[in-house]
């Protein structure tokens, strides 16, 4: 069956190969023999799978760059990934103690004690094309809010320092939506390891250094490794900073409360 599908997939539409796979599997004749309401429902699900493949293929072609030839295997992989994520809503009732993968759209109306939002990077979420349209950006911002509010107790937001996509190594900055979360609600955890960027790497258009810049040192009077005091958090050690001017954020590892990010324009840190 696999060999038949592989040999006949070239130049075939996604919905056609999906229908062909269903026919070769023998699932429809099998369910027809079972009869009953459940069997009929399963047959309808298989038919709906073909319709979903057709709709996905149409959307996929629209999102691809003009003039760029799309390989069938790429579209199929994307469709299967989407189908797995869309199944998350159904999983919520059946597998309460399991990890449930789903899209933000599928998560609407659901709540979980623990939520992970992954891939929170510029170019992914929000997408690279959203920056060109205000309407798109606002829609993604609303979706981000949906994701955040799915968490009943804890929310983990992650992003990659480097990500390989389409054969190219990318170094995206963290999503702008992360910066819109009130600083007092965020506890940032970073790995000690750093990512080295080769000279041939895709250039970035932002400064995301985890070290103090010369300007930041001059503005704040602080430096990496310096011990400081905060009225609420006590003493700690400066780990890193980002941003410029009054919006400069400083990462401090406090002795009693752990790592905190503080905006210099809204807090006072005294050198110890």
Image (cartoon, helix red, strand yellow):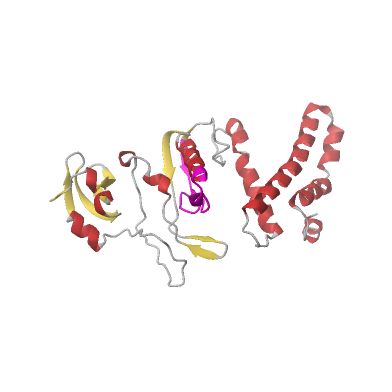
Residue 2 drawn at (x, y percent): 77, 56
Instruction: Tell me, yes or no, if residue 224 can be seen here.
Output: no
Quadrant holding the N terminus: bottom right
> For the view shown, which residue lies furthest in the top direction?
37
Does residue 217 appear to the left or right of 202 in the view shown? left
Closer-to-camera residue (151/1): 151
Q: Is residue 116 magenta?
A: yes
In which quarter of the view is residue 213 placed? bottom left
Q: Is residue 108 above or below residue 137?
A: above
Question: Residue 168 placed where, x, y %?
Answer: 53, 65
Question: Is residue 35 found inside the magenta-colored segment of the image?
Answer: no
What residue appears at the point 55 percent right and 32 percent down from the top-left corner?
Answer: 96
In x, y percent, where is residue 157?
Answer: 43, 45
Residue located 38% across and 59% down the image: 206
Q: Which residues are magenta?
A: 114-136
In depth, the one of 197 and 63 nearer the eye is 63
């Amino acid at each position: 069956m696999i060999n038949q599908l592989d040999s006949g997939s070239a130049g075939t539409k996604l919905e056609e190969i999906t229908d062909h796979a269903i026919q070769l599997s023998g699932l429809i004749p099998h369910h027809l023999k079972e009869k009953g309401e459940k069997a009929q429902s399963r047959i309808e699900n298989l038919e709906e799978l073909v319709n979903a493949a057709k709709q996905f293929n149409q959307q996929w072609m629209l999102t691809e760059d003009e003039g760029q030839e799309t390989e069938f295997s790429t579209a199929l992989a994307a469709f299967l990934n989407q189908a797995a994520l869309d199944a998350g809503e159904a999983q919520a009732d059946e597998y309460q103690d399991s990890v449930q993968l789903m899209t933000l759209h599928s998560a609407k109306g659901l709540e979980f004690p623990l939520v992970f939002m992954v891939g929170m990077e510029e170019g992914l979420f929000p997408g690279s094309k959203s920056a060109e349209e205000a309407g798109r950006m606002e829609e993604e911002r609303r979706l981000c809010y949906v994701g955040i509010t799915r968490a009943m107790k804890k929310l983990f937001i992650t992003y990659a320092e480097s990500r390989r996509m389409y054969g190219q190594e990318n170094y995206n900055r963290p999503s702008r939506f992360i910066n819109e979360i009130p600083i007092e609600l965020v506890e940032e955890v970073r790995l000690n390891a750093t990512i080295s960027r080769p000279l041939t790497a895709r250039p970035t258009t932002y400064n995301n250094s985890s070290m103090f810049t010369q300007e930041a040192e001059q503005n704040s009077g602080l430096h990496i490794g310096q011990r400081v005091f905060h009225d609420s958090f006590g003493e700690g050690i400066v780990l890193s900073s980002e941003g410029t001017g009054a919006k400069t954020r400083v990462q401090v590892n406090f002795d009693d409360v752990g790592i905190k990010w503080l905006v210099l324009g809204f807090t006072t840190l005294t050198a110890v």
